[in-house]
Amino acid sequence: MNYESLRQEAYEANMKIPENNLALYTWGNVSAFDKDKCVFAIKPSGVPYPDLTVESMVIVDIEGNKVEGSMNPSSDTPTHAVLYKEFVVNGGAKIGGIIHTHSSYAVSWAQAVRSVPLFGTTHADHIQKAIPCTPYLSKEAVEKDYEKETGLLIVKHFKELGLNPSEINMVLCGGHGPFAWGETAAKSVYNGTVMEEICKMALNTLALNPNANELPSYIVDKHYLRKHGPNAYYGQK
């Protein structure tokens, strides 16, 4: 099969990571998913962003097996595979790309093992709830299959909280860092960048006022629904 366009999409999205200041060195990856072929393209493991090429993107199936590519895929590949399998193939979510980074503010919240409260309209413009944070992985899960278990923990956490991954497109993994997704790889990078900014704003809010209140639901709903849903009116038609 020809995976050139999928590789191109993944490459362009990965190059946005340093451009958007979401990671140092090799601390991040993006994948691009083809639902019809049930494969995704992802950054090769440990390769600096300036050295990436379209051809270096690795093609992987949703079981995490390498399909095509000369290099090893990202070490986070099993997490991506689980999320595509459970959220998209089994769950029907419209997800075509996933990003994982170690961006500073999002990681700070993950290390505190705290969900990010919905304090303001910037947050509400994108999701209507706090950014969820999973608990730590168990010792058994880490020793069993760390990256795959990370994906399974995200899926379990969403089910326990009754969250729809088509609406809540970002999550923190306790002690680890952020994952975000979108309908395309480029949109996942956008959501990952928004997530980092929201985390920064929330931390600043608590620094200024440790007793800050969350945004009232009627303002949350107004801001979210003016951008999302059948009656959205933000932007150009």
Image (cartoon, rainbow, N blue to C red):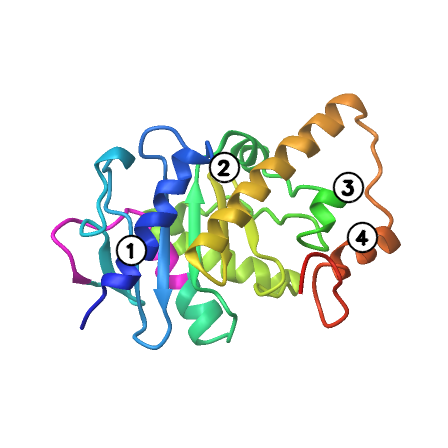
Image point 40% across, 55% down: which residue?
149
Q: Does residue 148 appear anywhere in the picture? A: no
The C terminus: image quadrant: bottom right
Locate residue 211: give its quadrant.
Answer: top right
Residue bearing the label numbered 3: 120
Residue 153 in percent (x, y) is at 48, 56
Label 4: which secondary element: helix
Q: Is residue 141 left or right of residue 155?
A: left
Q: Amino acid at mark 3?
A: Gly
Total tally of numbered discs in the picture: 4
Q: Nearer the viewer, mark 1 or mark 4?
A: 1
Q: Is residue 2 left or right of residue 105?
A: left
Identify the mark nearer the N-term, 2 or 3: 3
Residue bearing the label numbered 4: 220
Q: Amino acid at mark 2?
A: Gly
Segment colored magenta: 67-82
Q: Amino acid at mark 1?
A: Gln
Label 3: which secondary element: loop
Residue bearing the label numbered 1: 8
Within 10 angstroms of label 3, few (less than 14), some, or many (20 or more) residues?
some
Q: Amino acid at mark 4?
A: Val
Residue bearing the label numbered 2: 175
Locate residue 39: give its quadrant.
Answer: bottom left
Q: Nearer the viewer, mark 2 or mark 3?
A: 3
Residue 119 in percent (x, y) is at 77, 40
> Per the image, is 69 magenta?
yes
Label 2: which secondary element: loop
Task: Report the Cα–Cα distance between label 2 and label 3.
Answer: 25 Å
Image point 70% across, 63% down: which residue?
228
Above or below: residue 164 compared with residue 98: below
